[in-house]
Image (cartoon, rainbow, N blue to C red):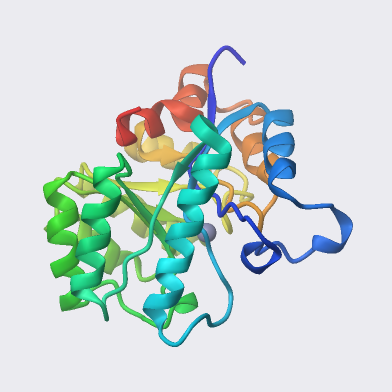
Amino acid sequence: MSFEIIDFHTHPFLTPLTNICDHTDVFDMDTDYTVELMKGLGVSRICGSVAFVGEYGSCWWDKIRHNNDEALRLREIYGDFYIPGFHVHPDYVRESMEEIERMHAMGIDLIGELVPYLDGWGSFTNKNFYEILSLAEEYEMTLSLHSGEVPEQGMLAEHFPRLKVVSAHPGEYHDFMRHVEWMKRCDNFYLDISGYGVFRHGMLRSGIDKCSAEKFLFGSDYPTCNPAMYIGAVTLDPSIKDSERELILSGNAKRILGL
Ligand SMILES: [Zn+2]
């Protein structure tokens, strides 16, 4: 490949507590493992938040802060290999806004992936969440969201035109087609191909034809999912052109994240 590959959607981990792989018994998964696996697949950079299944500390904010601090420690270990994403939480508006300021001051402008069901909250169309995002929009941040209701993610993107909103997981046919309609409508709404959906034959080609290759990003959701699957979906599908591969595998991430 004559271009870089960036995995837009990962959840790197420092300890077994934040390793969300279901099959840890078959690998020796330390921080070096992630680099070796990714580089072996041709991936030179990864992005995303630290995820944690279960509770931590005495309140949800303890867990958010723990995950964000772990992302900062991983950045120290990984250097340029890792572009951290951080969490905010709608039950903690002041703390979330302070976190946006803290991260922005360190050059970190990626929020998420946010996975509400892991962190005790629900809808993305939440008044407090919108208040938090108004500050993120001032910094023109990128927001990576776990799949939820497609219309509410699209409406969010429409409400914050200077925020770059990347929805995760194409899902099945009808959800995917709703993504496509919202992406056609909102210049700042994108989809990463991680998780469920892209194994449906023709799905990626159809999306590109309907709303252009500039709307799709390679993401894997590693270590839950196997990055090789999603790289293969882009590089081995003969219907995808080289110029489209470059956009999906890194060009769009570079443009959106300002790399
Ligand atoms: Zn994820």
Residue 148 in percent (x, y) is at: 40, 70
Question: Which residue is rendered at x = 65% and y = 69% of the image?
Answer: 17
Report x, y in % for residue 219: 53, 45
Q: Quadrant of residue 129?
A: bottom left
Judge whether residue 187 can be spotted in this image: yes
Q: Quadrant of the N terminus?
A: top right
Question: Looking at the image, which residue is at 49% across and 30% down?
Answer: 80
The residue lying furthest to the right in this view is: 26
> Taking 166 as reference, is 62 above or below it?
below
> Closer to the camera, 223 or 79?
79
Is 29 placed left or right of 64 in the picture? right
Q: Quadrant of residue 228?
A: top right
Q: Could you tell me how many numbered marks the image carries?
A: 0
Q: Position of residue 35 (x, y in %)?
A: 68, 37
* x 26%, y 68%: residue: 152
Q: Residue furthest bottom?
A: 58
Residue at 57%, 37% in the rendered image: 78
Of residues 116 and 82, the one nearer the viewer is 82
